[in-house]
Amino acid sequence: MDNELADMRRKVDDLGKRIAQREKDLRERGMFSAAHEVYVSAMQKAHIRLAGQVQSAAQASPTRWQGLKDELARDYNALVDELGRLIEHLDESQTKSDRP
């Protein structure tokens, strides 16, 4: 349980850094629209909620951890997918704006 929990913490921490970096990049390139702010803000809130769930899971019994582990993995993967969609959308927008 301890190794799995530590791994999940690392993944969630890394994801938070990736979300923050994407926001920073958007701001630096002048591409951070109101729509992006809403989307990134929702991802940040989901990340904070997930980090809290991971912290709570640390207090769980090994039996309870088995059920929480699947739930946390699902929520983590959903947030990774959201970030991937944002990146894909931004890449498509950038490609369109680069065309003559």
Image: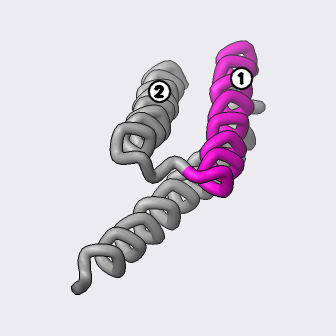
Q: Nearer the viewer, residue 62 or 31?
A: 31
Q: Residue at x 44, y 39 (%)?
A: 27
Tell me, yes or no, whether the two marked residues, 1 and 2, touch with CB atoms within 8 Å: no
Task: Please state the horizontal and vertical placement of residue 6, each as a whole percent of the image.
Answer: 46, 22
Q: Quadrant of residue 59?
A: top right
**Residue 2, relative to residue 71: is it above or below?**
above
Of mark 1 and mark 2, the one earlier in the sequence is 2
User: Taking the image as drawn, is residue 91 in sight?
Assistant: yes
Mark 1: amino acid: Gly
Q: Nearer the viewer, residue 7 or 22?
A: 22
Q: Give the prevailing secondary structure in the magenta stretch.
A: helix
Task: Please state the horizontal and vertical placement of residue 95, each as a whole percent of the image.
Answer: 30, 76
Q: Residue at x 69, y 31 (%)?
A: 65
SS at badge 1: helix
Q: Residue at x 50, y 25 (%)?
A: 9
User: Taking the image as drawn, is residue 70 in sight?
Assistant: no
The residue under label 1 is 52
**Residue 81, relative to residue 4: is it above or below?**
below
The residue under label 2 is 13
Task: Please state the horizontal and vertical placement of residue 61, each as a whole percent of the image.
Answer: 74, 20
Question: What is the C-alpha distance between the residues marked 1 and 2?
Answer: 11 Å
Q: Which residues are magenta?
A: 33-60
Q: Residue at x 38, y 76 (%)?
A: 92
Mark 2: amino acid: Asp
Task: Please state the horizontal and vertical placement of residue 74, each as a whole percent of the image.
Answer: 64, 54
